[in-house]
Image (spheres, grey):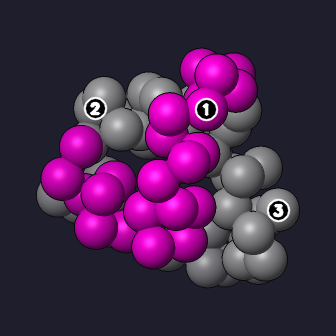
Amino acid sequence: MITKNSTIKQVFEQKPEQAQELLSPILGGRCVSCPMAEQEKIGEALQRYGLDKEEIKEIIQRLNSG
């Protein structure tokens, strides 16, 4: 299960198709291959890219529904 505390790497490993569709347009391709992807939490990354808590919650729900 994906949570806001899952790392970027975990999200792309667990839900590759959904992550590509939902996250790549926001994070871009660089975030996935960045060494920090192993440590950075998806909630923090999305917040840094300007999403609010409700938007982050919605993305996580969509990642888990697929």
Position of 46 relative to 4 (above/below): below
Q: Indicate yes or no whether the magenta region holds residue 19.
A: yes
Marks 2 and 3 sit apart, C-alpha to C-alpha, by 22 Å
Name the residue rendered at 72%, 52% in the picture.
Answer: 45
Q: CA distance from mark 2 to mark 1?
A: 17 Å
Highlighted range, magenta: 16-39
Question: Where residue 38 appears, x then y in whole percent?
Answer: 60, 20
Cα distance between the residues tagged 3 and 1: 15 Å
Q: Residue at x 52, y 62 (%)?
A: 28
Residue 61 can be seen in this image: no
Q: Secondary structure at mark 3?
A: helix
Labelled disc at residue 48: 3
Residue with the mark numbered 1:
34
Q: Position of residue 66 (x, y in %)?
A: 17, 58
Mark 1: which secondary structure?
loop
Tell me residue 47's x, y (percent). Answer: 78, 64
> Which mark identifies residue 14?
2
From the viewer's perspective, is the residue at label 3 or at label 1 nearer? 1
Q: Is residue 18 above or below residue 8?
A: below
- Sooner in the amino-acid sequence: mark 2 or mark 3: 2
User: Are circles 2 and 1 on residues that touch, CB within 8 Å?
Assistant: no
Choose top left, top right, bottom left or bottom right for residue 22: bottom left
Horizontal side, residue 20 vs residue 49: left or right: left
SS assignment at label 2: helix
Amino acid on which disc 3 is placed: Arg
